[in-house]
């Protein structure tokens, strides 16, 4: 009986020792460290710009648009051009016919001159015969002069011809046609608008919040929407003080050199709102968590979290400021997997010129 107890105790002790040895072996096995694969770039200072893209249309300056009209009442007999058509100096734009009352006024003025001329000749003969006075001849001279002035005024208005062509005073293109063939108009009615070939003005539409940061004289890069190889630099000339009701945007006028864009062409404008020297990293390098914005630098093979304040940003980069580790690269790929102190394996770093 005692022998059985001894055997059982021996077996239990042997089992415990075996378990302890197994635990010891398991404890002695090396634990594989967690290591994240990242890509880095050097932290560097450089100029960074904050820009806003706007869209608009190239137009000649309103100061250069010529409004064509007729100084007398009449009717448009024929219209020879359409909006957008290029015209040469001296080209006929339309044919205009005088109103009946215009022709009547010219006939009356012409008759008045003939009558005054006859009366003056008659009095000159009577004066030679001592049958009229010098005062009467002087009065006849004044009447004749007044009649000639009235007829000349009618001729300057074009009343001497029933049909007359309206011709362009210079090369350009027709930017507006306000009448059609058969239209009867009063004196001074605006018939057409002629714009010069050289477009020197662009109107852009910007958001209200952006317009408050734009200033007169601010540079603008203007790029064609058809081909990016065509671009020119301009400057802000005018900022509207009211919002356009239909778009809820603010219009700005930009002047530019001639010869690059055609009038009426749609373009893109890039305005630089501010520019400054800052620590700059790619936008993907900055993370945001419960404690705010941060980035990771790598020191001695481990990730170090750096709290940062962000500043100007554009499509690729962002300005940051914080207690950076001098000379330590910034993690730009794989940073979302990191925790402070995590071991990292750095892939081939990105060239600083790529930032």
Image (cartoon, helix red, strand yellow):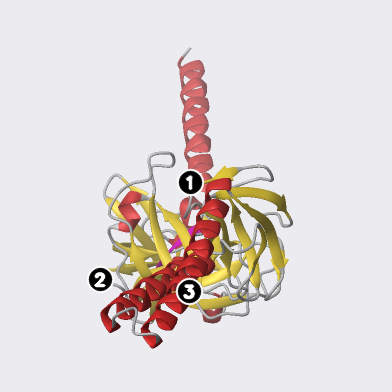
The residue tagged with tag 1: helix, strand or loop? helix
- Pointer 3 local density, CA inside 10 Å: few below 14, some 14–19, many at least 20: some
Label ID, residue 24: 1
Which of the two labelled residues, at mark 1 and mark 3, occupies the earlier sequence position? Answer: 1
Which residue lies most toward the top here?
A: 1
Residue drawn at x 67%, y 42% as measured from the top left: 182
| Mark closer to the chain start, 1 or 2 | 1
Residue at image position (51%, 42%) is 21
Q: Is residue 251 magenta?
A: no
Q: Inspect this view and state whether residue 101 appears.
A: yes
List x then y, in percent, for residue 223: 58, 69
Q: Are marks 1 and 2 in contact (CB under 8 Å)?
A: no
- Residue occupied by mark 3: 117
Position of 196 with respect to 6 (left or right) is right
Q: Nearer the viewer, residue 327 or 57?
A: 57
Rate crowding at label 2 as few (under 14), some (14 to 19) or many (20 or more) other CA atoms within 10 Å.
few
Q: Nearer the viewer, mark 1 or mark 2?
A: 2
Q: Nearer the viewer, residue 91 or 9?
A: 91
Q: Tell me the element at label 2.
A: loop
Q: Could you tell me if the residues under marks 2 and 3 are in contact, i.e. CB atoms within 8 Å?
A: no
Q: Is residue 110 left or right of residue 138?
A: right
Q: Quadrant of residue 302?
A: bottom left
- Measuring from the top left, give residue 353's x and y in whole percent: 54, 81
User: Magenta residues, as a range?
Assistant: 50-55
How far is disc 1 from disc 2 in space, using C-alphas?
45 Å
75 up-or-down from 123: above or below: above
Q: Name the residue beneath numbered marker 2.
A: 323
């Amino acid at each position: 009986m005692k022998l059985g107890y001894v055997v059982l105790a021996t077996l239990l002790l042997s089992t415990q020792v075996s378990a302890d040895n197994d635990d010891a072996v398991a404890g002695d096995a090396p634990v594989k460290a967690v290591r994240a694969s990242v890509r880095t770039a050097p932290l560097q200072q450089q100029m960074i710009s904050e820009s806003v893209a706007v869209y608009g249309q190239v137009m000649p300056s309103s100061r250069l648009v010529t409004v064509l009209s007729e100084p007398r009442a009449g009717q448009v007999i024929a219209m020879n051009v359409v909006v957008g058509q290029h015209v040469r100096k001296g080209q006929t734009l339309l044919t205009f016919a005088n109103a009946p009352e215009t022709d009547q006024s010219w006939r009356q003025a012409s008759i008045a001159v003939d009558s005054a001329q006859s009366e003056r000749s008659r009095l000159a003969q009577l004066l030679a015969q001592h049958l009229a006075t010098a005062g009467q001849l002087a009065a006849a001279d004044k009447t004749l002069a007044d009649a000639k002035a009235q007829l000349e005024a009618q001729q300057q208005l074009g009343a001497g011809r029933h049909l007359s062509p309206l011709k362009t005073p210079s090369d350009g293109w027709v930017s507006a046609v306000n009448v059609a063939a058969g239209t009867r108009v009063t004196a001074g009615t605006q018939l057409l608008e002629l714009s010069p070939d050289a477009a020197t003005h662009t109107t852009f539409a910007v958001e209200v919040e952006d317009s408050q940061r734009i200033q007169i004289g601010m540079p603008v890069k203007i790029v064609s929407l058809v081909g990016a190889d065509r671009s020119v630099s301009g400057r802000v000339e005018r900022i509207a003080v009211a919002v356009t009701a239909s778009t809820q945007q603010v219009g700005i006028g930009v002047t530019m050199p001639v010869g690059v864009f055609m009038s009426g062409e749609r373009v893109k404008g890039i305005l630089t709102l501010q520019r400054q020297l800052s620590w700059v990293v790619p936008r993907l390098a900055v993370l945001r968590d419960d404690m705010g914005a941060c980035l990771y630098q790598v020191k001695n093979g481990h990730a170090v979290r750096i709290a940062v304040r962000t500043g100007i940003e554009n499509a690729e980069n962002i300005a940051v400021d914080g207690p950076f580790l001098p000379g330590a690269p910034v993690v730009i790929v794989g940073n979302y997997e990191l925790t402070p102190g995590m071991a990292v394996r750095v892939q081939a770093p990105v060239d600083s010129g790529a930032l």
